[in-house]
Image (cartoon, rainbow, N blue to C red):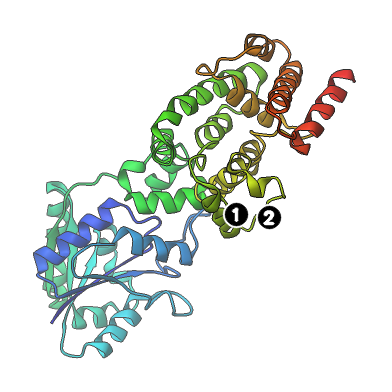
Amino acid sequence: MKIGIYGGTFNPPHIGHRNSAERAVSVLNLDKLLIIPAKIPPHKRLAENSASPDDRFEMTKLAMKGVNKAQVSDIEYKRDGNSYTVDTVCQIRGMYPSAKLYLLMGTDMIMGFERWRDFHVIMKECTICAFARHNGESRDIEAKLKELETDYGCKTKIVPTDIVDISSSEERELLSQRKGREYLTDDVYSFIIARRLYDSKPDFYWLREKAYSMLKPKRIPHVRGCEKEAVCLAVRWGESVDNAREAAILHDCTKKENLDEQLRLCKKFGYMPDEDERKSPNLLHSKTGALTAKYIFGCCDAVVSAIMWHTTGRANMTLLEKIIYLADFMEPTRSFDGLAEVRKLAYENLDLAVERAFSLSLEDVENRGITPHKTTVEALRSIRETIGD
């Protein structure tokens, strides 16, 4: 039996790691590839904004899903103290006494291999295999492996891999700039964004793709218009454009769900709807949309709150809440009496625009014979007090 051992911090695991795993299985004709996230790597200090061992382990499982013969192992994850490779190799040898073991590593690791704890033991138990990405690197690795063979009688192999010109540290930096999605599987990227690991911010193209897939097609022009209007209002009134964009893109993400599904989402996210909300998916969608934004897309509290109140408004609204309420109310696809006045006021006096929008909304509800939601009534009173002050 031929078993590969592929360890690392996987902080985060990117497509280069996945490609390397696939190549190792193919080139070495492995029966099993054990992919082993290090809990506490002994040879390098993790960056300050690193993911936790739990998160790195889960991301590695997501990244390697579907790789033939691969199995993400918790050997080091469950072990206390530093994750020394010699301990891992000896443990695997005990599990598979007659197996041929192949230890896989990248350029940096192979160059410093002789500084590893009990590296002689590792060489005795394993064939040392190095990933090589291009010609110059291959020559350096070949020379190093030849040195190990000559000096220690070590068995070695090179595993050629496809070029993926990214390191985990570079990927972490890109994630904080709304970049780097192309170097991750969608499952890993979604996991990172949901938890906002590495100070990550979602790529807006990805966020739109996800949000639009949750909508009925006829709703998409409204959401596009809301985003455009929210950005313009944010620029005009000095609010975070990024927050306005996130809130606008996601504000209707659960709009198409029926009442039963809305109530299921409330239960899932631990939200207790009031009596009116329990009867109205239109009221509930702002709440379930906000909670989806929080738990699925990792949005900050300001964005979550703006989505939460974009339908009814509330007393003492924040600037972002006012902007998203108005953007939803007056985006370009909307057309009804009184809207031109709101659009004009929105760029002249934001509070007056909000007051006028509340008034029009309440008039419309009352004209349809519906009792206005108490939150909107309170919101109108609050904004009038603000204007009066």
Q: Between residues 150 and 340, which one lies in front from this camera angle?
A: 340
The residue at the far front in this view is 369
**In this rendering, would 321 be left or right of 218?**
right
- Quadrant of the image for the N terminus? bottom left
- Above or below — where is 35 with respect to 327? below
Q: Which residue is mark 2?
A: 272
Disc 2 residue type (three-letter) = Met
Residue 118, located in which quarter of the rendered image? bottom left
Residue shown at 44% from the left, 80% from the top: 79
Q: For the C terminus, which image quadrant? A: top right
Q: Is residue 159 left or right of residue 324?
A: left
Residue 265 picture quarter: bottom right
Task: Estimate the x, y position of residue 6 in percent, counting from the top left.
Answer: 26, 68
Q: Residue at x 73, y 22 (%)?
A: 363
Q: Residues within 10 Å of mark 1 (few under 14, many from 20)?
A: many
Pick the front one: 187 or 271: 271
Image mark for residue 383: none
| Labelled disc at residue 266 | 1
Image label count: 2
